[in-house]
Image (tube, helix red, strand yellow):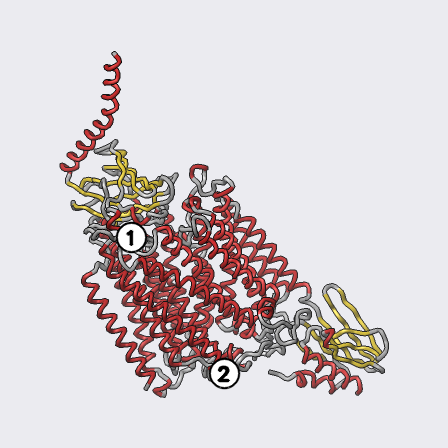
Amino acid sequence: MSAVVDSHGHGHEHHHDHHGGYSGIMRWITTTNHKDIGTLYLWFSFIMFLVGGAMAMVIRLELFSPGLQWVNPDFFNQMTTMHGLIMVFGAIMPAFVGFANWLIPMQIGAPDMAFARMNNWSFWILPFAASLLVISFFMPGGAPGVGWTMYAPLTVQMGIGMDFTIFAVHLLGMSSIMGSINIITTILNLRAPGMTLMRMPLFCWTWLITAYLLVAAMPVLAGAVTMTLTDRHFGTSFFNAAGGGDPVLYQHIFWFFGHPEVYIIALPAFGVISQVIPAFSRKPLFGYASMVYATSAIAILSFIVWAHHMYTVGMPVTGQLFFMYATTLIAVPTGVKVFNWVATMWKGALSFETPMLFAIGFLFLFTLGGFTGLVLSLAAVDIQLHDTYYVVAHFHYVMAIGAVFAGFAGIYFWLPKWTGRMYDEKLGKWHFWLSTIFINMTFFVQHFSGLAGMPRRVPDYPLMFETWNKISSIGAFGFGLSQFLFLYIVLKAIRSGEKAKDKQWEGADSLEWTHLPSPAPYHSFETQPVIK
Amino acid sequence: MDSPQREWAFLGSSHGFSVLLKRNCSISPKGMICVFAMLAAVTLSIALGFALAGAWLVLPFAGLEVVALVLAFLWTARHAADYERIEFAPGRLCVEVAEGRRLRRHELDRGALRARHAPERGCVVLGVAGAEDEIELGRHLHAEARSGLADALNRTLRL
Amino acid sequence: MASNWVRYLAVSVAGVAGLAAAGLALAAPWNLQPAVTKIAADIHSLHEYVMILVTIIFCGVFGAMFYSVYAHRKDKGHKAAQFHESTTVEVLWTVIPLVILVIIAWPATKVVIAQKDTSQADLTIKVTGYQWKWGYDYVKGEGEGIHFLSQLATPRDQIEGRKPKGEHYLLEVDNELVVPVNKKVRILATGGDVIHAWWVPAFGAKQDAIPGFIRDIHFRAERTGVFRGQCTELCGKDHGYMPIVVRVVSADEYTKWVGEQKSKAAAAAGEPKKIAVAAKTARQ
């Protein structure tokens, strides 16, 4: 007779003293605990969200009226550039890495991430990168004013702030790669017995695929900014036509990274939504397998559509057509996801707590952004809309509304599990409605100004666009202010929220709800569960 | 959550059986190689493609990333196959410990053997009281399970 | 109840905002500018066609969702069904979107091909983007040899708010590009320093002006008038201040304009010669 006892093991890295032996700030600096690191990521991203948001306020303030009122065009360009970089790399990505750190080990029944120490480094690189970005404002010539896409050869004209930004991007890339390798290894190697890949919560699936995308795309970005650096200082001519290079090559490289990046942001958001909607529909996710396949299909397609960001560079007709067809194809798997979410709600027993409101908001508004994406995918139409406010509206619908709403949904959903305390449901609903109304005010009208011909990245505009810009600015101020309500709700929950139940949401069925108390203990699943 | 006691309950019930303690690896090292090799291949071929288009500076970064992937793989694979097997035979206790590339076998007389949970060493120590020869067990278990293992071993040894 | 009160307030605020927006929409331009070329008209109809399709799908999907939100509520006592897959349905909603895409792709392809056909142009003009003005060279066709720079004519005082803004604020230049009506004009775009983009919305023509490379587009304006656009690729500080203004004129007027430009150019070219002659005479 033989009995097998499987057990996990980290042999070497067990901290059985509660917080790794340090207290105060040192606890956070030295922590290798996935929950601590998740918390760090989330707070970091919220701070960056406010910093990037403040820059958006400067942009909207200047655009409130035609003419130059508050800032000069140079500073305006620096604002648009840093707003983009900080929101993408500082706010949205780290927020979802924070979710990944908190949730993946708990959802697959693992005690921690596979490389706990490396996890600490991946986080602590970020504050340095963010500081470099902020310091660049105080350099001679200020921060780069080239847009977050950093197109050559404009980058060559920038001051030393550009180099700071390049180093910051390198650091951010390093952090992402370490994080991704960690996530891939954790998901593949540390699943509890019985937790097969096709039984994993969809959030883990979307992150597994996202991590793949990051690993494939990040070296390309690192290469792109390095070539920018050598073109600036070391006499190379990668992107300089006079030296035999090609400025358009930069765009190809950037968008080869940039388009997967869009899904790096969107896929974890899909994952969060796929957890929230079934929980409040009290019904299993519809079409789990097709969700997994659709996510993979989106990821694969994301590598062959990059040049749809470049319809106006003058590609040959075959190029325009190939990228147009490939891009429209993305609508198919994305459609499958949307249909599946709606089918999950169909005939459920729906209730509308704050996470569900944000999830429905996501579903509705993200799809709206998806449809304008379809419009933009048509090369012929894009010629008219490229680099106008229509594009700004489109990508803010999928990112500033899509990803951010998914983030809010996730935070309200898991806050009881993380902190053991409930947020104020009434205030949460206020936060949802205020955010939804103001963000639509901000971005819906930008479709109109874009269609009518307003270019993006301009500090000033012809008089006919004034109405739309006024509405947009008021909406932006309202949205910005509403986020302080969010901060208040979270702080209030942590300080004096009602005690949360272990399974706060009736329909939630992943391990963190079914197997762990609220708040989740500092060390969870040291005895691993067996999933039947 | 299963309590540690229940996990070891069967230990006391019979003589002729073995316990296998191993790390929980939900993917085999071979599977891991496939996954990482695929990632490296994709990254390198993308970088090669760009190098051919004139942007060779993507290559060094892809190279660095592949190095990171290899290191990560080695780190997980080094101890992926570690195990400890405890076999009870009449009068004897056989312990087999595989650690990295080393495999050690111990055959012990059950007579004076005692197991002791040693939290400071992160293992269960098996040996004859006073003797220098000791075997460390239970490295793949967490603290509570280790003390459970020590109790269960002692109970079985006394049978 | 408090949560109901929140809901009513939110709905009424949204309603008021919606009405206000609708009211303003009547006053402000909200759609693509009126088309002056066939391609721009084709882009309009393609855009409308896609928007109609998309709106139908949107209403279908979210009609279902909001019906569910209305009918399948827990507080109404609706019990959750437990179905979670249906291969038929899943295949269906993969295939139907594919078919719709093919239906869209057909007209879209036609317009792309038309946009890219720059052959047999009547007039070829090279456009060079500089920081922050445009250079125009008539390289082939009537007016060959004409070249000039075109930059923002809006005074600084208007931009900085010291004077009221004029009707064509930011959309006026010193030297307009002049082209004949109903003639196929080929634009060769290039950049002098960084990348710019030449765009006239009414023509449905936009092309990045890339330093070191020449890329072409074309348009055939079908009526006379003045058409305005702006640079659409971030090109540094004054990216927002380098408009494009094209004056489309009748064939006769165009010939007259070419004549004027030629004599102006000749006068300018003659100037140094005259001075040289004068200098020679003086020495004698």
Judge from the rendering whether residue A249 lies leftward or rightward of residue C47; answer left or right: right
Q: In this rendered view, identify the residue nearer to me: C54 or A254.
A: A254
Q: Split into 4 quadrants, where in the image is the C terminus of chain B?
A: bottom right
Whether the residues at callouts 2 and 1 have beta carbons within 8 Å, the answer is no
- Label 1 neighbourhood size at 10 Å, few (<14), some (14-19), many (20+)? many
Q: Is residue A220 visible?
A: no
Placement of A203 over or under C31, stated as above or below: below
Which of the numbered marks, if any, corresponds to residue C152?
none
Placement of A371 over or under C7, stated as above or below: above
Amino acid under disc 1:
Gln
Which of the numbered marks, if any, corresponds to residue A384?
1
- Label 2 neighbourhood size at 10 Å, few (<14), some (14-19), many (20+)? some
Judge from the rendering whether residue C214 lies leftward or rightward of residue A11; answer left or right: left
Q: In this rendered view, identify the residue nearer to me: A412 or A133.
A: A133
Q: Residue at x 31, y 83 (%)?
A: C4
Q: Residue at x 21, y 63 (%)?
A: C25
Counting from the top left corner in percent of width and height, residue A8 is at 64, 73
Counting from the top left corner in percent of width and height, residue A104 is at 54, 71
Q: Chain of mark 2?
A: A
Q: Chain of mark 1?
A: A
The quadrant where residue C62 appears:
bottom left
Seen as rendered, the residue at the extreme left is C252
Amino acid under disc 2:
Lys
Whether labels 2 and 1 share one chain: yes
The quadrant where residue B148 appears:
bottom right
Judge from the rendering whether residue A101 lies leftward or rightward of residue A476; answer left or right: right
Q: Split into 4 quadrants, where in the image is the N terminus of chain B?
A: bottom right
- Which residue, given by chain and number where applicable, does mark 2 sit on? A503
Q: Residue at x 22, y 41 (%)?
A: C176
Q: Disc 2 on helix, strand or loop?
A: loop
